[in-house]
Amino acid sequence: MIKKLLKSAFTLSEVLIALTVIGVIAAITVPMIIQGTQKSTVEVRLKSFYSKINQAMLRSYVDNGEIPELARSDYNYNQNLQWLQTHILPYMSYISASNCNDPNQYRKNAVCVQLTNGELFEFVVDYNGADILFFPDGKWLNIQKEPRVQRRVFPFQFSKRAQGMDDTVIKSKIFVEPYSYTWNGSKSDLYNNSNYGCKNGKKGKWFCGKIIQDNGWTIPDDYPW
């Protein structure tokens, strides 16, 4: 009986082969599972932020009337904070609103708002409208310098002048939308735009959120994750 059991048992080499196969499969599937979870989290938080901030804008409109056009100038920190305190902060759950200490000179007056769910957004008004950077993981980073920013920060815009100070065309005047300033309307430009394209090797990647929105708030297969 014992001899039969020994003959039917796995040899040491067979066990090692089986463990090796299992290890290879795990090495392939575990990163895919982790990446899928990360993508799903970003998708949910991105869509939720878009909804919440526009609900805040709508409630502000009901309480305060039409939101006045932004001045054609860079706002200082107090002006940025005052705008948020009027139109956004009373209608969103947040912990704090403070200076981001952004090392970029043109964003030194930005306000960072820490939300109660752990997320963070940065708000600043410059000469052509308002920029809003959303950080799903709640950690601020420099969008021009940090690697893989297309996973960790997603720009939005409000009341952007389409071609700069001399143009009267204003995009997203009454609502916040994913950043699409100067976008020509083509899918190719979302990836390859010389200033804002969402493509590895480019700085900023400001159009990344727009790509996800246009795909039904789902990260597409060709997204540079």
Image: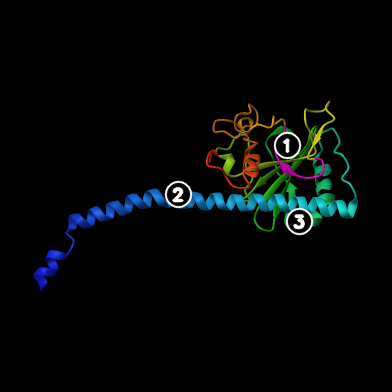
Q: Secondary structure at mark 1?
A: helix
Q: Residue 32, which numbered label? A: 2
Comparing marks 1 and 2, which lies closer to the viewer? 2
Q: Residue 30: where, in percent of width, then height?
A: 42, 52
Number of residues whose C-alpha sits closer than 10 Å to that of mark 1, classed few (under 14), some (14–19) or many (20 or more): many
In the image, 61: left or right of 157?
Answer: right
Q: Residue 25: where, in percent of width, then height?
A: 35, 51
Q: Residue 92, which numbered label? A: 3
Q: Residue 93: where, in percent of width, then height?
A: 74, 58
Q: Secondary structure at mark 3?
A: loop
Residue pictured at 59% horizontal, 45% vertical: 152
Q: Secondary structure at mark 2?
A: helix
Indicate the amino acid at tag 3: Met
Residue pictured at 55% horizontal, 49% vertical: 39
Q: Quadrant of residue 154?
A: top right
How far apart marks 3 and 1 lie (CA) works out to: 23 Å
- Residue 221 among those drawn in magenta: no
Earlier in the chain: of badge 1 and badge 2, it is: 2
Check the image and report above or below for 73 versus 78.
above
Name, please, the residue furthest toward the bottom.
1
